[in-house]
Amino acid sequence: MSSNSEVITINLDTPLYKGSISLNTGLFINGEFVRPQESQDAGKIDIINPSTSKPITSVHLGSSLDVDIAVDAARKAFKSTWGLHVPGSVRGQKLQRLAELIEENLEEIAALEALNCVASLILGKPFAQAKQELNMACITTLKYYAGWADKIHGKTIETNETKMAYTRREPYGVVGAIIPWNNPLAGLAWKVGPAVAAGNTIVLKPSEFTPLSALRVASLINEAGFPPGVINIVNGYGPTVGASLASHPLIAKIAFTGSTITGRKIQEAAAKSNLKVVTLELGGKSPNIIFDDADLEQAIKWAGIGIFANMGQACCAGSRIFVQEGIYDAFIQGFTAVAQHLQANTGDSFSSPNTLHGPQASEAQYKRILSYISSGISEGAHVQTGGEKHSDGEGYFIKPTIFTNVTPSMKIAQEEIFGPVAAVIKFKTEEEVIEMANNTTYGLACAVFTENISRGIRVAHAIEAGTAWINTYNTIENGVPFGGYKQSGIGRELGEYALEK
Amino acid sequence: MSEVFKLELNTPAYKGTVSFPTGLFIGGKFVEPIEKGKIEVVNPSNGKVITSVSAGTGKDVDIAVEAARKAYKTSWGLKVQGSVRGQMLLKLASLIEQNIDEFAALESLNVGKPFSVSKNGDVTNTVACLRYYGGWADKIQGKTIEFAYTRHEPYGVVGQIIPWNFPLSMISWKIGPALATGNCIILKPSEITPLTALKLASLVSEAGFPPGVVNIVNGYGNTVGQSIAEHPQISKVAFTGSTLTGRKIQEASAKSNLKVVTLELGGKSPHIIFDDADLEQAVKWAIRGIFSNGGQVCSAGSRIYVQEGIYDKFLEAFTEGAKHISKNTGDPFGEGVVHGPQVSSMQFDRIMTYIDSAKTDGATIHHGGERHGTEGYFVKPTIFTECKPGMKIVQEEIFGPCAAVIKFKTEEEVIEMANDTTYGLAAGVFTENAARGIRMVHALEAGSTFINCYNMLDKAVPFGGYKQSGIGRELGEYAIDMYTQVKAVHVNIGLRL
C-alpha cells in the first residue's frame, strides 16, 4: 500500500474567494493518506461543480478491501490508544483542537464546500451562506461534543443492603458512518463529534458527490492530536464502501443519513450480518402549518427558509405548507414575492455576495426535481411561480417553485422532492390540518405558526414528528436532539441524546 | 490604574520574572481600594515580605456588586449563550496554561509548595478544571414534566471566598461552575495568598469576559468577607475555609437576605488500613494523605487507623517515609524538595501548640514534632502514636503535617471510632477484600470516600462534606446544581375555568 497519494491544487479567482487550495484526494486511513488497494481499485470519480456542470477535480474511490484495512486500524486504535484507555477530557481536547483548526482554515474549507456543494465549496451554496452555515453547523457542533467527552455518566442504583449496582456507559468500539451530500461538513461533525467523544473509533464514508471538505478536514486530524486509526475517511460508492460498512462483522454500530430507500438497505445488511446497532436519519415531507392568527410577515419569511434554504435539499424541509383559509390569499401573495426574489438572485456561489439561490447538487437531482414538477402539473396542481429550470445556461439551477391547488394524494404532496418546490394546501380547522399533516409515512419535522400559545403547543404535541418548531423553522441547536418518527428515522442526533447512541 | 509588581527569580526550578498587578479587579479594571488599605504578602520559606497588595473593604464590595449586577442584566447571564460563556472559560484556561511556569512560581513563592507540585498539581489542575466547566456551559438542562418544565437559572451575583491552601486551584473550583452557569462573581482570595488570584485577574479581560462579570476583591475576612456574607444583593455565597468561619457566614446570611450558602470546611478524616491491605501501597497513600501540602488539606487523612496484625510493619514503613520527607525539606524552588514551609507564622504557631498538647495529653511523638531549620515556617513530618480518642490531636483539625496513628482490632470498632467526630469530609479504606472495602465506605459518614487510594480527586467527581465538614458539593455536575436555581413553568394548553 503506497502512502504517496495525490495532492491536487484547486485555484479560485472569483469576486468572493481568491486562492489556491491544496487537497489530498486519497483515502485517509490509520493517520495517513493512501491510495486504494490496487486489486479492487475502483478508479476515481469526477467531482462536479454544480454551478457550471464541469469537473473540479477527481478523487480516489475506495473498495471493501480499503474498508477492511480501515476497520482493522480502527480496532487497533480502540484497543490501545483510544476508547476508555484515554480519559474523556483528553478526547474532548482533541475534538476541540480539530474544531479550532477548521476555524483557522475557515475561508478555505468554506470555499471548498461552496464549490462542491453550496454550503461547502462543493455543493454550490452561496458563499456567504456557506461560511456561516459551516461555522454554525460544524465547528460549534464539534466544540459542543468536545465538552461532553468527560461527562459521560452512568448511575448507581440502590438495590438492597448486600449488593451495590451501577451502570457504565461504554463505547461500542468501531462505528461506521455514512453521510449525505446536502450538508457535508455538518454531516461529518454530527457523526464524528458524539462518536469520538464517547470513545469510539470511526470509519466514515462521505458522499461520493461531495468529498472535498471531508478530505480537507482529514488533513487536520493528525494535527488535532488524534492517534492513527481513530478517525478514518474512506471515500467511495454506496454499493461498495457503504454496503461494506453496513455488513462488516467488526463494526459494532452504523449511523446513516440519507434516503429512506438506502436506510432500509442498511438495516437489512445489519440484520443479515452481525446485528449491528443501526441509527438512521432519513427523509421527510414535513408539514409547515400556518394559522389565521399567525404573524403573517414572519410566517412568510420562515416558510421561505423552510422550503428554499439549501435549494430545498434538507431532510427536514417544510415542503407541505398548510395555510388556514382566512390568511390564505395574503400568504400566497407574500410567499410568491419571496420565491421571486430568490429567482432574481440566482447564480454561482462565488459570483456575488447577493446570490441567494444556487444550483441543485447534481444532474441526477436536477432531473428528478424537474420530473416531480412535471408530475405536479400533469396531476392538476397550479404553478403559482417557478416550475421550470432557471435558464438554458450551465449548471443545475431550478427556479424556486410554488404549487397551489394541491390535493393530498398528488405525488408532489406525498413524496420527498428534495428541491425548491413548495406544495401549498388550504385548510379550515385545527383537527383537519392535524389529520392531513400526519397523513404521511414520514415524521421528521413540523412547524406551527400561531400567536396563541396553547394552540401552538397543542398542535406541536399532536403532530407525529421528531422535531416540532413553533413560530420558527429549521432552527437547529447543538444541544437539542434531532431525528425522525415513523419512516423518517431511528435514533436521535445532537444534544446529549446522540451520546446515548 | 494600579501598580504591577515585578520580581526576578533565579532558582534551580525557575529563572525569570514573575509579575502581578496589586490592585482590586473590579468592573474589568484594576483599581485602588476606596480606603487605600494594603496587606503585606509574606514568603513563608523565609518569613520575609514579598510586597504589599491592595486590601479592600465593604465599600469596594459594594462597588463590585454594582458592577456585577449591571453586567448580569446586560452582558452576561442568559443573555449570553452557554457556548459563548464556555469558550471564554476555555480561553482563560489556555491563557493560564501559556503562563504555567510563572503561575507555578507565584504559587510556590506565596504558599511554599515545591515548584513541581505547583506546576504539575495546582496549576495543571486549575487549567483542567476550567476546561471541564467550559464544556458544561451549554449543557445546563432542566426537564419537561407533562406539561410543565423546569429551568435552571443562574442566581445573578454570587460571592465566593477561598482559602490559602490551594489558592489558584480553589479559584477554578469556584469560578468554573459559577461562570459556566451564567452568574457574575465577587471573589475574595485569602489575604495571605493573593498572588495567583491577581495574576489570573490580569487575564480575565483577555479571555473575553465582559467587565463586571468577574471581580476579584482582596481583603480581610472580617471586612471584605463579612461584607460579602451579609450583602443584600448577593444571592448566594460559597465559602471554603475553617468551620469556625463557616458558621459566621451562615449566620450572616440568616441575618441579612437568607442568601444560599454552600460551605466546604474542615475535616479530621480517617484513613483505615486492614491487615489484608497491600502494605507497601497503603503506606505510600498514607504518606500522601497527611504529608502532602504540609498537611494543609481539608481532606487530609489525619487519623490513621491500622489493624493490629499489620500495625508494627506499617509504622516502621510509614516512619521511613516520613524520614525521607524530612531529608527532602527545604526551599520550594530547590532541587528535589518535596516538603516546604507551612503557609504562615500563625499556622506554624498553631501546629506547634497542637504538638505540645500531644505531649501534655500523653501521646508519644514517634517522629518529628519540632521545627525544621531556623528560617521560615517549616515543621518536620510528625507521627503521634499511643493516641486516645479524647485527645486534642485526635479530635481537632491540626492542618499540619501531623499524623495520629491508632491501632484497632475489628471492622465494627474502627467504623465507630472513625465516625466519632463532628467532621465528615473524607475517608479512606485499604483492603484487598472488595466487599469489605465497599461495605466500609458505605458505613463511613463522609462525603468523599476512597478505596485503596486517597485524595485522588477528579474534576468530574463531586467533593464535599457530611456533618460539620460542609454543605453542598463542588466539582462534577453537582457543582452546576449549586449555582443554579430551579424555576418551574406551568403552561396551560387547554384548561378553561
Image (spheres, coloured by chain):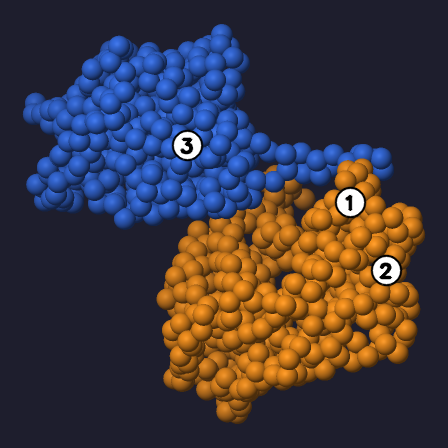
Chain colours: A blue, B orange
The image shows residue B245 at horizontal and vertical percentages of 72, 75
Chain letter of mark 2 equals: B
Mark 2 Cα shell of 10 Å, populated few (<14), some (14-19), many (≥20): many
Residue at the outermost top position: A272
Q: Is the C-beta separation of discs 2 and 1 under 8 Å?
A: no
Q: Is the C-beta separation of discs 2 and 3 under 8 Å?
A: no
The image shows residue A250 at horizontal and vertical percentages of 48, 17
The amino acid marked with disc number 2 is Ile
The amino acid marked with disc number 1 is Ala
Q: Earlier in the sequence, mark 2 or mark 1?
A: 1
The image shows residue A85 at horizontal and vertical percentages of 53, 37
- Which quadrant would the C terminus of chain B be assigned to in this image? top right
Helix, strand or loop at label 1? It is loop
The amino acid marked with disc number 3 is Val
Q: CA distance from mark 2 to mark 3?
A: 51 Å
Q: Indicate whether A102 appears above or below B255.
A: above
Chain letter of mark 1 equals: B
- Name the mark nearer the viewer: 2 or 3: 2
**Viewer-side residue, B168 vs B112:** B112
- What residue is disc 1 on? B277
**Viewer-side residue, A336 vs B378:** B378
- What residue is disc 2 on? B406
Chain letter of mark 3 equals: A
Q: CA distance from mark 2 to mark 1?
A: 16 Å
* Residue at 9%, 41% in the rendered image: A14
On residue A230, the disc is: 3
Does A52 sit left or right of A496 as displayed? left
Helix, strand or loop at label 2? It is strand
On residue A56, the disc is: none
Q: Is the C-beta separation of discs 1 and 3 under 8 Å?
A: no
